[in-house]
């Protein structure tokens, strides 16, 4: 019996699952990737278990960074679309009223054991991700602690552990060993292949902020906006930036706190997607330029075997918006499931021959076929 399924698939791709690990009570989520990029998301969570009292210690800040988990997931997808590989991403799902994952453990967990466990897991996952990324890419890796700010000026605030008053200095002051020693990209200053200075890496033509500004996302510091001014509540970087970057002696990972403005960056699905695509393009340019990291070399750590679907034939169709899948088997009782790169099932059907695929976003998917004998086969595809 022949089954026909219509899907919009162009390229068959053999890449890439992220391995997903959840911490205790699912408060912390770790996606082990295979790119030299580590992203943490400390303030986007919304879990408010009653077993953890609300934080009140040490003038606790409890406002969350809206849509930053959603943004990180879309950045993850944008990396997969651009490279076939995943960044490492660590999410804190506890609401900031229960745990602040960008503070030291005393201020962040306020003495609650359950929150302390989550805090330790969050930081241990970052350490683990950095070790793996460094071993895969010869010690080179970029860390972004992803946030959202509520300041009125709509621009990205890039925090390299330099205060607004420090960034107001001249380039020559920023290039002194004293100021380089304050920086969360001091390894990059020492090792970048063009021998660019600290100030050039902060606000020269090939600085991260400058490349983002050129892509339509005003950023500070950058060539366009060299320093934030001292009345703007600029975020210079917090606990994570100070503890998971080359600011720490012996750590070669360069990093920053990225505070995203709301309008045009994280306010809607479409704007998050546009920003994610631009950010991924900029990060690639930045790392190729300064560290000659070749993204096409990302090695894939698949947690599921990839087997061809012997009986499920995917053939490109001249029409751009779909291809034909023929299921050529006598099996009459079967299930087809389509799973996105986040591990979410986006389509599932039993014994059905035609699928309307138009609702799917561009990206990598897995088609999983299970017959009545519970035999399972999977195939990875890229929807364009
Ligand atoms: Zn934040």
Image: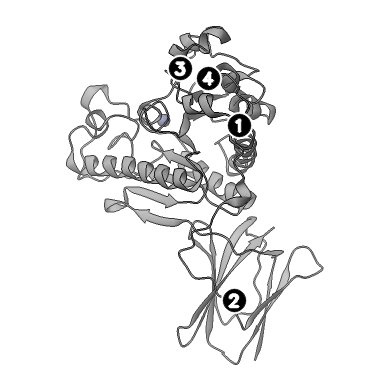
Specify which label sits upstream in the sequence, 4 or 2: 4
Local secondary structure at mark 1 = helix
Q: Which of the two residues, 21 or 130, is positioned nearer the viewer here?
A: 130
| Distance in Å between CA atoms under marks 2 and 3 | 52 Å
Specify which label sits upstream in the sequence, 2 or 1: 1
Specify which label sits upstream in the sequence, 1 or 3: 3
Q: Which of the two residues, 116 or 155, is positioned nearer the viewer here?
A: 116
Q: Disc 4 marks which residue?
A: 152
Q: Which of the two residues, 256 or 264, is positioned nearer the viewer here?
A: 256
Cβ–Cβ under 8 Å for marks 2 and 3: no
Across and down, in percent, residue 364 comes to 60, 59
Specify which label sits upstream in the sequence, 2 or 3: 3
Local secondary structure at mark 4 = loop
Q: Residues within 10 Å of mark 2 (few under 14, many from 20)?
A: few
Q: Is residue 377 left or right of residue 325?
A: left
Give the numbered dot on residue 290: 1
Q: Residues within 10 Å of mark 1 (few under 14, many from 20)?
A: some
Cβ–Cβ under 8 Å for marks 4 and 3: no
Residue 231 in view, yes or no: no
Q: Disc 3 marks which residue?
A: 162
Q: Residues within 10 Å of mark 4 (few under 14, many from 20)?
A: few
Of the two numbered discs 1 and 4 in the rendering, the one whose residue sits closer to the viewer: 1
Quarter of the image for residue 195 reads: top right
Q: Disc 2 marks which residue?
A: 308
Specify which label sits upstream in the sequence, 1 or 4: 4
């Amino acid at each position: 019996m022949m089954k026909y399924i219509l899907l919009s698939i162009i390229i068959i791709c053999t890449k890439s699952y992220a391995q997903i690990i959840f911490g205790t009570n699912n408060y912390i989520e770790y996606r082990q990737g295979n790119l030299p990029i580590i992203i943490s998301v400390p303030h986007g969570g919304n879990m408010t278990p009653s077993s953890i009292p609300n934080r009140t210690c040490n003038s606790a800040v409890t406002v969350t960074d809206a849509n930053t988990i959603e943004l990180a997931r879309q950045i993850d997808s944008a990396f997969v679309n651009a490279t076939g590989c995943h960044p490492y991403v660590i999410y804190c799902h506890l609401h900031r009223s229960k745990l602040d994952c960008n503070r030291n453990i005393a201020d962040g967990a306020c003495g609650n054991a359950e929150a302390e466990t989550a805090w330790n897991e969050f930081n241990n996952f970052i350490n683990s991700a950095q070790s793996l990324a460094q071993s895969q890419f010869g010690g080179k890796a970029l860390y972004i602690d992803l946030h959202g700010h509520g300041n009125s000026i709509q621009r990205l605030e890039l925090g390299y552990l330099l205060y607004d008053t420090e960034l107001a200095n001249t380039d020559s002051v920023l290039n002194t060993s004293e100021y380089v020693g304050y920086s969360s990209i001091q390894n990059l200053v020492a090792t970048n292949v063009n021998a660019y200075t600290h100030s050039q890496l902060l606000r020269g033509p090939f600085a991260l902020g400058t490349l983002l500004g050129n892509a339509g996302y005003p950023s500070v510091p950058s060539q366009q906006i060299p320093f934030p001014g001292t009345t703007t509540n600029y975020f210079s970087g917090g606990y994570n930036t100070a503890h998971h970057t080359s600011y720490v002696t012996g750590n070669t990972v360069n990093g920053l706190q990225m505070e995203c403005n709301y309008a045009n960056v994280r306010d809607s699905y479409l704007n998050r997607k546009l920003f994610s695509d631009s950010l991924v393009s900029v990060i690639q340019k930045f790392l190729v330029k300064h560290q000659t990291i070749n993204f096409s070399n990302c090695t894939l750590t698949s947690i599921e075997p990839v087997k061809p679907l012997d009986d499920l034939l995917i053939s490109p169709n001249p029409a751009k918006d779909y291809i034909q899948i023929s299921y050529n088997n006598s099996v009459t009782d079967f299930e087809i499931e389509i799973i996105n790169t986040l591990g979410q099932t986006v389509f599932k059907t039993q014994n059905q021959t035609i699928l309307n695929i138009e609702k799917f976003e561009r990206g990598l998917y897995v088609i999983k076929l299970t017959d009545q004998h519970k035999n399972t086969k999977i195939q990875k595809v890229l929807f364009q």
